[in-house]
Amino acid sequence: MKLNKWTIGLAALGLVSLSPGVRAQSTTAPAPAAIPLTTALSATVISGYVDTSAIWVPGTGDAHPAPVEFNTPQKQDGFNLDAADVKIARAPDTSKWAAGYVLELEYGPDAINPFAGTPIRQAYVELMAPIGNGLDFEIGQWDGVLGYESSDSYKNPNFTRSYGKSLEPTSHTGVLATYKFSDVFSAQVGIADSLTGAGNANSAVTGQPESKKAYIGLLSLTAPDSWGSLKGSTIYGGFEDGPGALNNDRQELYVGTTINTPVKGLTFGASWDAVWSDDMTVTTYTAPTPTPTPAIYASADTDVGYNTSYAGYLSYAVTDKMTVSARGEYFHGNATFVVPFANAQAYNADILGVTGTLAYQLWDNVTSRVEVRWDHACNDVGGHGGDMFGGTPGNIGSNGYVTPTEKNEVMVAANIIYKF
């Protein structure tokens, strides 16, 4: 990897630290300064990744791709820069009252930018308090804590996201406390402005008191070494309650687990997400051009929307470099609530999804994988005879939306990510 002179200079002065993979490749960097700088930047680490993909959907019509997070019509049948992420962080040291910070910037169509007009994904102060085993606080903007899958694609066994991941909030603005009771049991508790990351908008909503907040909790249990081949297996249970995207009440329950097995390299996982919300009563949908943008779709159903997702995972490390992963999932609920579900007029959707992924590490610091995904609409969604996928811009129904034309969709994808 080629490092620019500015980065090498900062590292030489002790202002930043390079990640281990970069340090191993940087054999020509100048030696550190003889006198270390005792500034707040002396332990700063710069890391991140560049995430790219190529997606092919056999057949014609991409207006309604599989309705999962980051899978927009614009990304189908093409090459994509998904996201470029840069994280600047200083971890707390070992002192009793240690402090640190994280600033993470993200760019691209898959970027998580809760604050409109900025590239900020995370920005928080991390404070350690010498209480018991050590109480950790994150104050500011931080990633959501619930879910089996991460917003960072390379951390997941599959390239495309699950339906459960698509239900979960990605970030929050508030305070998150983490406490590790033991090697077996830990807990996270947070209070935030909302279940979205956009900050406090409650005071601008008629009838919503400004003091209304969101509450987040997650408990984790990890199998100890005495459990043999099951050691390191983890089960999670979490909840979220508070104002959602339209500042209406929203609740989410999550249970997930990762299970190691006696077979070397074989891991199982499972997750369940359930969301209740009245955010589904009004949905805005912008159809792909040249389709006219329809007006706001107002639902006659004012009941609380309900969505649930079940997923099972299997990963097997065939060699040190090759891993095969599979995911099976089932989604049920009101598609009007789920963003970015393109078929906004659909109700009571039932969808099956099966995904297979082959990852092979050809280059250091690079995640390279190919994936095949199949999604199937199980019922008559929105009066289209079971069709939920496909659709071309010229095929516009009487409601002003592109009409889906397929009950099944197959996607083939390749994904290359460089981590630094």
Image (spheres, rainbow, N blue to C red):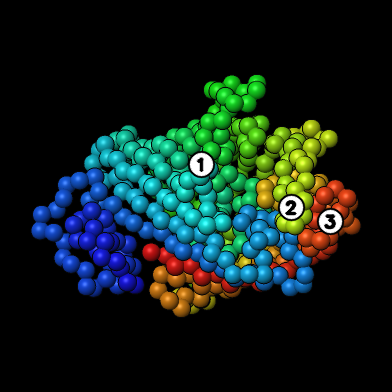
Mark 2 to mark 3: distance in Å? 10 Å
The picture places residue 22, in percent across and down from the top left corner, at 32, 67
The picture places residue 47, in percent across and down from the top left corner, at 37, 58
What amino acid does circle 2 point to? Ala
- Looking at the figure, which quarter contains the C terminus? bottom left
Question: With 302 as the anchor, is 255 left or right in this view?
Answer: left
Vertical relation: 390 (above or below) 143:
below
Badge 1 element = loop
Looking at the rendered image, the disc whose residue lies closer to the viewer, 2 or 1, is: 2
Q: Which residue is mark 2?
A: 287
Looking at the rendered image, the disc whose residue lies closer to the viewer, 3 or 1, is: 3
Give the mark nearest the N terminus, 2 or 1.
1
Q: Quadrant of residue 160?
A: bottom right
Q: Which residue is mark 3?
A: 396
Give the mark nearest the N terminus, 3 or 1.
1
Q: Is residue 333 visible?
A: no
What amino acid does circle 1 point to? Phe
Density class for disc 2 (Cα within 10 Å; few <14, some 14-19, many ≥20) is many
